[in-house]
Image (cartoon, grey):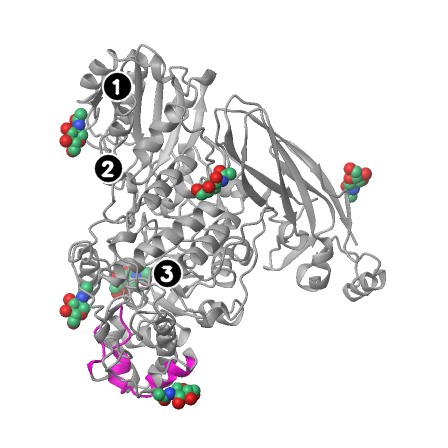
Amino acid sequence: MSTTLTTIILILIITTTITTTISTNPTTYPCHPPHNTQYQFCNTSLSISTRAHALLSLLTLSEKVNRLCNNDTGISRLDVPPYEWWSESLHGIASNGPGIDFVAGPIKAATSFPQVIVTTSSFNRSLWFSIASAIAVEARAMYNVGQAGLTFWAPTINVFRDPRWGRGQETPGEDPMVVSAYAVEYVTGFQGGGLRNGGTGGRRRVLTGNGGEKELMVSACCKHFSAYDLENWGKYTRYNFNAIVTEQDMQDTYEPPFKSCILQGKASCVMCSYNAVNGIPACADQKLLQKTRTEWGFKGYITSDCDAIATIYEYQNYTKSPEDAVALALKAGTDINCGTYMLRHTKSAVDKGKVEEEVIDKALLNLFEVQLRLGLFDGDPIKGKYGKLGPQDVCTSDHKNLALEAAKQGIVLLKNDNKFLPLQKHDVSSLAVIGPMANVTDELGGGYIGVPCSPTSILEGLKKYVKKTTFSSGCVDVACTSNGGIKEAVSISIKADFVIIVAGLDLTQETEDRDRFSLLLPGYQKALVTTIAATSKKPIVLVLTGGGPLDVTFAQGDPRIASIIWIGYPGEAGGRALAEIIFGDHNPGGKLPVTWYPESFTSVPMNNMNMRSDISKGYPGRTYRFYTGDIVYGFGHGLSYSSYTYSILSAPNNLYVFGSLRTKADNILKQKGIFSNYLYVNELEEHCNSLTFNMEISVTNHGPFDGSTTVMAFARVPGHFKGAPLKQLVEFERVHIVSYKDARTRILVDPCKHLSIVNEFGKTILPLGNHTLLVDDVEHVVSIAM
Ligand SMILES: *[C@@H]1O[C@H](CO)[C@@H](O)[C@H](O)[C@H]1NC(C)=O
Ligand SMILES: *[C@@H]1O[C@H](CO)[C@@H](O)[C@H](O)[C@H]1NC(C)=O
Ligand SMILES: *[C@@H]1O[C@H](CO)[C@@H](O)[C@H](O)[C@H]1NC(C)=O
Ligand SMILES: *[C@@H]1O[C@H](CO)[C@@H](O)[C@H](O)[C@H]1NC(C)=O
Ligand SMILES: *[C@@H]1O[C@H](CO)[C@@H](O)[C@H](O)[C@H]1NC(C)=O
Ligand SMILES: *[C@@H]1O[C@H](CO)[C@@H](O)[C@H](O)[C@H]1NC(C)=O
């Protein structure tokens, strides 16, 4: 590790505690009287692009170079104030970015929603949207009082490819379609870029309009582009890793979330990742980065991950000098560097003729346009629309209730023998609560947290229901390297009527820069659980924390462990949400957005990026779409206190691609010269609409509680197409069903989109023949012919 990089990384880590004050006194806005009203860049009746060009035209080369880092020190001669580009908001305003300050200002806390993997488990789009909108309000309020920037580096939308990944918790799970849907809700909710499609039927409206030029409430960033999902495994680190990705996997797994985030979400930022993709460091990969603009219509700025320009030279050894790294990154389309590498090496790169000033100009235009769209130069930004937001809009009861709601909707009931749960309040005279995570608060937020408004521990949550509640941590910490605490835990649990044990993970086990090597419970945790289960009066409830899958096979089969509940990192209201579920005030309906693999999966090399299995090499593949081995719990698993059955009420049996236009079909066949059992989707465009159909589904709640569940419709393509998924998610819809009643939902199926697959050459094809639609255990066959 080079000393510069070491220093920078240390600085980046330390910045979580550094405080900076961003002045938002209106007189410091460059375009607010008495400043610069004569300058074109301040003329709000001009287009954003004209204003950006106007500002650029005033700058010297060194002023331009000084803009290329996250900590922009401002241009005093033009009254452009300092600006910190780096703020974080993954699941609430987080202290990780130096743009956020919880100390020097009136706002001392912000709502801490569940970690993303938990919120995702709700499979509720309107919840996702509402959370992002709430975070945006708190973000803008913090900006107004000088405690935050306006550019936030969330959401994390890499697919959760490997269960050991330390940042899997930050993602919306393993399915690219779900990750894409989450990205769109988060970005549109956060940026304030459009009204949500509230209608039924699943498919959302694509936001149109003047897109790129739109004003922004705050700016969201799709990260980390691309194929980033390894922190530190064996000799591989995120800094030196070269992800080898097939075209097929790239097109149907790694890229779709980014495409949606940009094309439908209209995100105003993309972050390129540390790793290389097929030999080229992401931030130096012109083809990769330009695709966002040329194919997906991206309007915004591309930032490097923090020090991901330095790593091009220092870790990836991709260039011969720092100047070459900087020049390559700028030419590829990276607009700004988180870190100081560009600041230090760009001038000399220009002097040595490695990069032209025009390339820097392009980068600056992207940066200025985003700042102008945010209203950053104009004072009481965006005509007073957001200027009123302040401390009174942060940690409101609405936001805190939403955090509670998200935890309740996301928590997943994995096992519930003989309807052991819910416990009846009046039947529980005493409760023992065991485990190192049971009496903590901040740790329930997982990675990227700030200061929560009203944190509750699990213990506090349960005490609200049962006065006589005792507690023992059982282990000193989550690593649980000693069995010394088990005895005390047994001594309290044997006296209690019911026992709830909280096991699992925290950030000491899985986080940024830290992948796991085992999927088992850490240290003596399993011994703690089995000992308590063996000595308690009644079967126990096992509560699991952590974002990554756990191999809890031992507990699945153990009748003394009646129920298992996964809470992940449920955020500031998690303790209360769990208690409401355990005591039946909320009927759980969350479902796992990621496959839970057994420990044996750890023999799979984490650096193998292939999604598809290769049985000849003993490679089992990844995620429910391709993995062929044993599982602990599957994607979509999640129980309720009610039971539900599903039926497909209507869907077509036959679809003819060309309808009456047989000649067209014949022409295509002639052109190919051979009979084909598939069609290229890009040749079908005008036929896709006429193929689209509604699938009507009914769900019956067999009681005894009202509840919400998620209808998941999958599809399986006919025949043997190389690398076809075992099945793929078409659509999901969370529905509420009153006890002993049914509810209907309609899913719009666009065969070109939902029944197509990507072939080995990265082309999307629509197989002809019998496709199978699956909802739970109900199947329906649709034949697609020319
Ligand atoms: C702002 O731009 C508009 C449109 O070009 C122009 O008519 C107007 O004179 C400009 N205002 C100033 C103060 O330059
Ligand atoms: C940003 O730059 C200013 C001016 O050089 C410096 O005072 C400040 O400490 C820097 N902030 C961070 C977070 O590095
Ligand atoms: C890059 O170079 C450094 C120092 O020259 C060396 O230690 C490191 O192993 C190289 N890394 C790669 C990925 O080749
Ligand atoms: C739970 O943790 C809090 C805060 O650390 C502490 O004050 C309290 O004593 C703990 N409760 C028990 C029962 O140990
Ligand atoms: C989805 O979330 C919203 C917001 O919390 C909530 O009002 C709605 O009831 C949820 N939908 C279902 C079906 O649970
Ligand atoms: C498709 O399914 C129909 C009815 O289920 C069956 O008659 C037909 O032979 C199948 N076609 C193919 C190509 O398998």
Label 2 vs 1, first from the N-terminus:
1
How many C-alpha atoms fall within 10 Å of the one at disc 1: few (<14), some, or many (≥20)? many
Q: Does the residue labelled 2 lie within 8 Å of ligand 4?
A: yes
Label 1 vs 3, first from the N-terminus:
3
Label 2 sits on a secondary structure element that is: loop
Q: How far apart are marks 2 and 1 (CA)?
A: 18 Å
Above or below 641: residue 611: below
Label 3 vs 2, first from the N-terminus:
3
Task: State the quadrant of the C terminus.
Answer: bottom right
Q: Give the range drawn in magenta.
A: 49-76
* Residue to which mark 2 is pinned: 441
Q: How far apart are marks 3 and 2 (CA)?
A: 31 Å
**Residue at the image point whose x is 43% and y is 19% from the top:** 557
Quadrant assignment for ligand 3: bottom left
- Front-lying residue, 108 or 763: 108
| Residue 87 appears in view | yes
| Residue 608 appears in view | no
Q: Which amino acid does label 3 sit on?
A: Ser
Q: Does the magenta stretch include residue 124?
A: no
Q: What residue type is labelled 2?
A: Thr
In the image, 759: left or right of 52? Answer: right
Q: Which amino acid does label 1 sit on?
A: Ala
**Residue at the image point whose x is 41% and y is 83% from the top:** 50
**Residue at the image point whose x is 40% and y is 26% from the top:** 585
* Residue to which mark 3 is pinned: 273
Label 3 sits on a secondary structure element that is: loop
How many C-alpha atoms fall within 10 Å of the one at disc 2: few (<14), some, or many (≥20)? many
In the image, 607: left or right of 81? Answer: right
Q: Where is residue 342 in the image (x, y as percent from the top left)?
A: 27, 74
* Residue to which mark 1 is pinned: 432
